[in-house]
Image: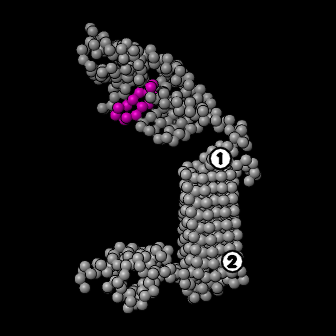
Amino acid sequence: MTNTTMTSRSYLLGELIKRIRTTNNLTQGNFGKLFDPSVTQSAIARWEKGELTPDMMHFPKIASLLNLSFEEFIDFIEQPTSKIEDLDIENKTLKYNKRHLSMLEKGVRTWNNWREKNPDVIPQLSGIYLVAGKLDNLDGYNLQGANLAGLRGNFIQMKQANLAEANLEKAQLEGGSFCGSNFSGANLSKVKIKDARFDRAIFKETNLSEANILYSDFKEVTFEKACMKKVIFSRVNLSGANLKQANLESAQLTNIQLREANLNQASFKKAILSQCSIYGSTFIQTNIDDIKTEDIFISPNGFEGIPVNNLALAQYTCLQRYDPLLTQKFVSYYNLETEIVKYSKLLVNKYGDYRYKGKFSLFATHQGLNIIPPFVVVFKEKNYLYTEIVPDYDGADSEKVNRLSHSHRKILEIKDDLVESSFIFEDFDILKRTFDYIQTEQKDKFEQAISIAQKILYSTKKNKFANQNCTIEGINDEIIICEIPHGFEGERIEIAKGNIAGNQLEMIRSSVYDNHLVNLQNILLNLVM
């Protein structure tokens, strides 16, 4: 057999194996456990890619999964007469293993001991029928990874059971209790549930896509990161449920109790919500694009009062209705935060100095300013800004600020478009007083600095001046004055920037203090003498 033929055969086998596995809703790891001896997940992955050909000892098993005899299977991979897509590959795992079912019937202790001694065996229990009076109590059973696809259960008990990573695709459960059971990572796609209780069960990262769930209790259930696309919930109690980061795209929720549910970061894109009670629920960063809502109740008494139809405003409307005083406080706080953001940006952008090397702006109250205590710092770098107040600073010396680092109080932080704040009214008053003082104080000093800088450039008959302490540039209609700090090689600090249009001087930035004016005056005196 040529290498080309071998490669073609491996590729065909890989495609067949992948179709068999996906049809049976198995992970590569669980599919490998169907073979005797079992095959590793990495080997299955290489089979599917055509990088590795299965050992011939596994061919009979593959043939049986294809409903082919061994001879028919060999003929097909040697000389295929039809396309893989045309093969009738059925879900063979819907046929339960009689030995496994017999073991299940021996009780929870015997079953769990058997599971512990045979960790590589996947229980094949697909299509079994559990009914009241006949194998109806599976409380505490270890069914992790079990194949229960097509399971039918009427009024059964399966409390505190472990069904993590189990396959329950197209299962039908009516009545009964599954409270506290763990379904994490399980496949419950297209499952049908009616009149059942799942209180405090765990469905973390579970596949519930296209599930149909009616008249059931799911109180305090965890659905975190679950896939719930196109799920249908009707007359279901989801109060206290955790649906954080769950995907409910195109889901339909009708007559649902969602009281105090966590819907943060969940996706309800294109979902339909009708007759739902959401009092106390949270919707932080929830995706509600193209959502359709009708009769959303926000009353603490459930389905009472006038419903709303705007989910985005539901929480605020609830607060406004049932706690108007708190609403007023919230609005006041938000307005105050807006003012603090405004004054912080004005202080750092207009009255802070800009560091060219570090590429950031810094405003800090100065011992030369008669507005202390406290000490105010506003820092800005690209899309990041923060404002701090040091209430214990007495203005004695700037080094004392560092020694009081334990009492620094950050009142504002902005990262990109996210604004976070924690302040009291006095903080706003401090910023406002600081701005009012610095605005008046800098107006005179800015005009003096620019006037002296113009005279320096005129005296040198150049548009640039530089010495060991500062630089001055006159570019087009702009004048920029920079300080060169001692001990910071290559650094320049922009302390003044103005635009001159006609006879009008516009301040762009000013962080000029007495020592700067003295330095500029000395430069001018040396030039004219």
Identified at 37% across, 35% down, the residue is 358
Q: Residue 157 falls in which quadrant of the image?
A: bottom right
Residue type indicated by callout 1: Ala
**From this viewpoint, which residue is outermost toward the top?**
529
Residue 467: x %, y % from top left: 28, 21
Q: Height in image: 344 above or below 293?
A: above
Quadrant of the image occupied by residue 126: bottom right
Asked if the stretch drawn in magenta spans residue 354, the answer is yes
Q: Amino acid at mark 2?
A: Asn
**For mark 1, what is the residue?**
314
Q: Residue 154's mark?
A: 2
Does residue 125 lie above or below 357 as drawn?
below
Which residue sits at x=56%, y=59%?
A: 250
Kindly identify the residue that appears in the image at 58 percent across and 49 percent down: 284
**250 on left or right of 86:** right
| Image: magenta residue range | 350-364
Decide which of 10, 55 is in the foreground and name it: 10
Q: Are marks 1 and 2 in contact (CB under 8 Å)?
A: no
Q: From what the image shows, is residue 394 above or below residue 42?
A: above
